[in-house]
Image (cartoon, rainbow, N blue to C red):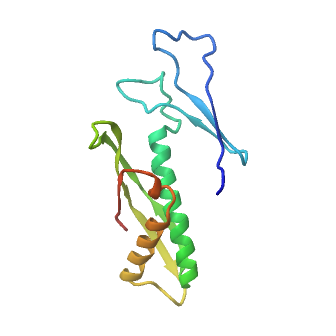
Amino acid sequence: MSEHIATIEWSRGDQPFLDKRYARAHDWRFDGGAEVRGSSAPSDLVPAPLSDPAAVDPEEALVAALSSCHMLFFLAFAAKAGFVVDRYRDEAVGVLGRDERGKTSITAVALRPAVTFSGALLPDAAAIDDLHHRAHGACYIANSIRAEVTIEPR
């Protein structure tokens, strides 16, 4: 078992609150010292400037966490198999919608990794599919969410 700590901090300051026109921007701080600006997703419900379009919203963070987890396992499995990965880029997309319970949730995530290999041993399509399959099965985030996750290698 291990713990993973994030500190989320928001402060109202001098802005009104009960009229629901308060800023949603806040800070995420992680135990290693990284700090990220967070906000609600800019939408018709919470338009800018109440939401900060430049900040990371929780939905984006979930998609990024899933993509990052998958990539880290993919790289580990590729290295163990003797494949040299030079570059890994994923343009992952999450879909917010209604789930089978009628609740708004991330219902689907498409991982779209483009991987560049080099070296004497290059994986064929079946080996790449196997690496993705194993990475998905091992990914803690994928194992923790209800959304359908597809992997669409580029």
Identify whether 34 is placed above or below 84.
above
Identify whether 134 is placed above or below 47.
below
Q: Is 95 in front, or is 121?
A: 95
Where is residue 49 shown, x and y percent of the image?
Answer: 48, 22
Q: Can the viewer see residue 87? A: no
Where is residue 7 shown, x and y percent of the image?
Answer: 65, 37
Residue at x 41%, y 24% (from the top left corner): 47
Q: Is residue 1 left or right of residue 84?
A: right
Identify whether 3 is placed above or below 44.
below
Q: Quadrant of residue 104 in the image?
A: top left
Identify whether 10 is placed above or below 134.
above
Residue at x 45%, y 24% (from the top left corner): 48
Furthest toward the front, the residue is 1
Total marks in image: 0
Where is residue 39 shown, x and y percent of the image?
Answer: 52, 31
Q: Quadrant of the N terminus?
A: bottom right
Q: Can the viewer see residue 23? A: yes
Furthest toward the bottom, the residue is 120
Residue at x 45%, y 75% (from the top left corner): 131
Q: Is residue 25 left or right of residue 144?
A: right
Residue at x 42%, y 64% (from the top left corner): 113
Q: Quadrant of residue 100 in the image?
A: top left
Q: Quadrant of the C terminus?
A: bottom left
